[in-house]
Amino acid sequence: DASLAAVTAKAMEMAAEAARAKREEAARAEEARARAAAEAAEAARREAEAARRTERQREALQRADLERERQEVRLIMSRLEAEAPKLRLAARKASEAVEASERQVE
């Protein structure tokens, strides 16, 4: 009876140890899954931030391009405005020359 009780106790102890080891292994596996999920979430967050940063950079480049175009247009307009009086004078002189030629023909 004593040896049967000892064998039974040893078997129960071994079963309890196996169950404890199994629980520990399950806990380690769950921790590993949680770490992997956290790492994946962090990677996704970094990727999203990089995409936002790239989009902001693209928008900044577009704004800079538009500003350069505006400056070019302003420069062209100021040059045209500066040339307008000269062109009007040249047109008036050409018109006067045509009128003078017409008077000579008459």
Image: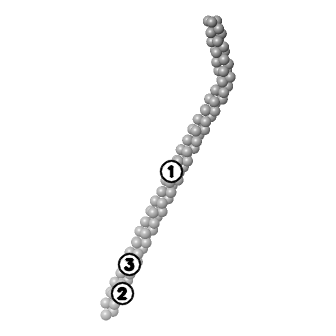
- Which residue is found at the position 36% from the left and 84% from the top? 12
Which residue position is annotated with label 1? 51
Quadrant occupied by the N terminus: bottom left
User: Can you give x and y, in whole percent of width and height, for residue 61 in the image?
Assistant: 56, 41
Q: Label 1 sits on what residue type? A: Ala
Note whether 71 is above or below 43 in the view shown. Answer: above
- Which residue is found at the position 64% from the left and 18% from the top? 91
Image quarter of residue 84:
top right
User: Can you give x and y, in whole percent of width and height, for residue 82 in the image?
Assistant: 67, 25
User: Can you give x and y, in whole percent of width and height, for residue 97 in the image?
Assistant: 65, 11
Q: Are marks 1 and 2 in contact (CB under 8 Å)?
A: no
The disc, 3 or 2, on the residue closer to the chain's N-terminal end is 2
Cα gap from disc 3 to disc 2, whole angstroms: 15 Å
Q: Are marks 3 and 2 in contact (CB under 8 Å)?
A: no
Question: Which one is nearer the viewer's eye here, 29 or 102?
Answer: 102
Q: Which dot, 1 or 3, sits closer to the camera?
A: 1
Question: Which one is nearer the viewer's eye here, 91 or 76?
Answer: 91
Quadrant occupied by the C terminus: top right
Q: Label 3 sits on what residue type? A: Ala
- Element type at marker 3? helix
Q: How many neighbours does mark 1 have within 10 angstroms: few (below 14), some (14-19), or many (20 or more)?
A: few
Q: Which dot, 1 or 2, sits closer to the camera?
A: 1
Which residue position is annotated with label 2? 9
Question: Which one is nearer the viewer's eye here, 19 or 63?
Answer: 63
